[in-house]
Image (cartoon, rainbow, N blue to C red):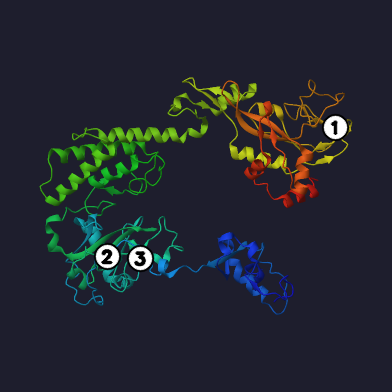
Amino acid sequence: VNKCSRLVGKLAIAGMPKDLWSLPKDQLPKAAKEGRVVAGFYQVRTEHAALMPTLRTWLLDPFDSPYPEMISIEPRRRVVILIEVDRPRFLFGDVNKFRKRKPVAAAAVPEVPSGEHENVPPGEAVFQWWWGDPFRQWGHWKNYHPQVNARLEKELANNENFRNCAEAIPLDGVRYCLQRISAARPFDYLDQNVQGNFREPFMPEAVVKVDHWCYDDVTRVSNNCFVQFQRGNPKRRRPVRRIRRGEAAGLVLDSGDPCGICFSETGYATGCDKAHLICGSCLRTGLRIVVGDITQTENLLCGCLTMKDDMAFEKLSQLADSTLMELVKKPPENPQRLQELDVELMQVRRQFQLPMSIPSDTFQKKVSDWLEKVRTRAMEHLYHACGYPGCAMSNWILRTTFTEQYRSKGTCIWTCGAGHRNSVLPSNSEIDEMNRNVLSHPEYYTERCGCDVLPLRRFRLCPECTNEGLLTFAVHESGCKQWPGNVHQHRHIFCFHCTGRWGSACTHGTICTDPGIQQVRRARDSFGNETLQLGYINAKAYIKWIRTGRGCPPTVFDAGEEVQGDVRQERLGLEDRDELFKDITEGTA
């Protein structure tokens, strides 16, 4: 080991002593005490991972060179332990014991090299995707658009990796990809769950093999099984096959640019900058997805629209209504198209809770309502919301108005437009954090302050700010018990010894008493309004508890209400008396 390192003479892993992986069992987590610890695992920050090889080279340097200048900071890393636990074989011996049984798969098909037994010559083929649910054996095949077919045929002829099932190709350059599969190379991304950074985890049931029931024997033997999937989310996938064009002659559509979602039919412009097209079926389906989620305001429909494209959504909703009404008045004669329409009408009625007769302006109303809700949600951060369930946003109060009309007058209580009384107070986590800070140093930082010759603590909460629903953390640096020393530094002035209002409850000539360590909580006043309430802890008893562990004093609030000391310490996470004693010893200087 490099003698410039502090690890000289020690075994190390990733620049840390190996002893960290061999701690006594009483220092391990409870779950680790019953198993075996496997050493050697560690976690490192992503941006620091590139520094680890340089650090390792320096540690192994026999010439004792100084710490490399290229490593400006030491890589952030930490120890990870793997716990191996023996489990009874009669319970855990069979990993498939409780797995849902699947139907018996078709017999395995021997691997056929690409090009052999190719029953669909180039130029005479058409690619089809499965419309419906391929995992419930329901639906039918649909053609890709002729332009898409031509592009896929070109890729199949020129791209050797795609032809040999070694890589996927983009379908539209934005969201979808296509991959050829074989018996030896199924659609399987299980080993890429970590480095792939997928939006949804790829589970074993998402694997697609050539023995999937959608593919017939001819398709399997001729190596014409494919899978279409979302880029960055292979869990979203569907089977695709390549067949002779004559088999789908009845579904061939007119020429023109294809729909950018299903790639099957010609469509209408979405109004985006990339001039994407979308067919009537995908348009209606996409709008139903859009209006069902007010939290998604980007990458909508074709992947390019946002909530700001209200004119585009207005025209597209009108188009969705008109195309749907045309289909309702004159249903398609093709049984497969009729099946698609029946399913779509069922989904529209169920999602929008409509009767059998669908109104002619359904999509226009739903899109208009969605746009209004999205705009409202985008402005929520400007308001204090009414706590009464179901109170409309029109009754809420602007934060600026609250500050001008209520906070400036020393009150945290306001009334909404519907007459509901509300309080604007810090959250419980913010209150706990403030209580922790005050309680971490119960000692006096000085025994004789200037002018008044009184002992003072370093930290206090401004009591008048607390009455107004605010938490002001006051720090005393030096001088007398008046805080702050300058009237222009804070709008409230109080005594740092007794916390009384300066000039009325306390002055330099007043002999005052320290009430103890402050704590604050949310409570109800006599009118039922939620406010902040101060309580106090006996400081001498608290410090004695830290030293001896006996008799943790309670927090005493108004009217003699108490919170037990052990309950308080557990809530605040201040149960380690050794750490508390260390803080007192170090002080606040």
Q: Nearer the viewer, mark 3 or mark 1?
A: 3
On screen, residue 543 versus residue 342, left or right, reads right
Most foreground residue, 163 or 570: 570
Characterize the local packing of mark 3: few (<14), some (14-19) or many (20 or more) Cα atoms within 10 angstroms.
few
Characterize the local packing of mark 1: few (<14), some (14-19) or many (20 or more) Cα atoms within 10 angstroms.
many
Q: Image quadrant of residue 362?
A: top left
**Residue 305 has which mark?**
none
Dot 2 falls on a residue whose secondary structure is: strand
**Is there a contact, CB below 8 Å, between mark 1 and mark 2?**
no
Tell me the quadrant of the picture where the N terminus can be found: bottom right
Which residue position holds label 3? 97
- Under mark 2, the amino acid is Phe
On screen, residue 481 versus residue 119, left or right, reads right
Pointer 1 or 2: first along the chain: 2
Q: Can the viewer see residue 120? A: no
Dot 1 falls on a residue whose secondary structure is: loop
- Under mark 3, the amino acid is Lys
Residue 375, position in %: x, y?
A: 42, 34
Which residue position holds label 2? 226
Dot 3 falls on a residue whose secondary structure is: loop
Q: Residue at x 16, y 72 (%)?
A: 119
**Residue 480 has which mark?**
1
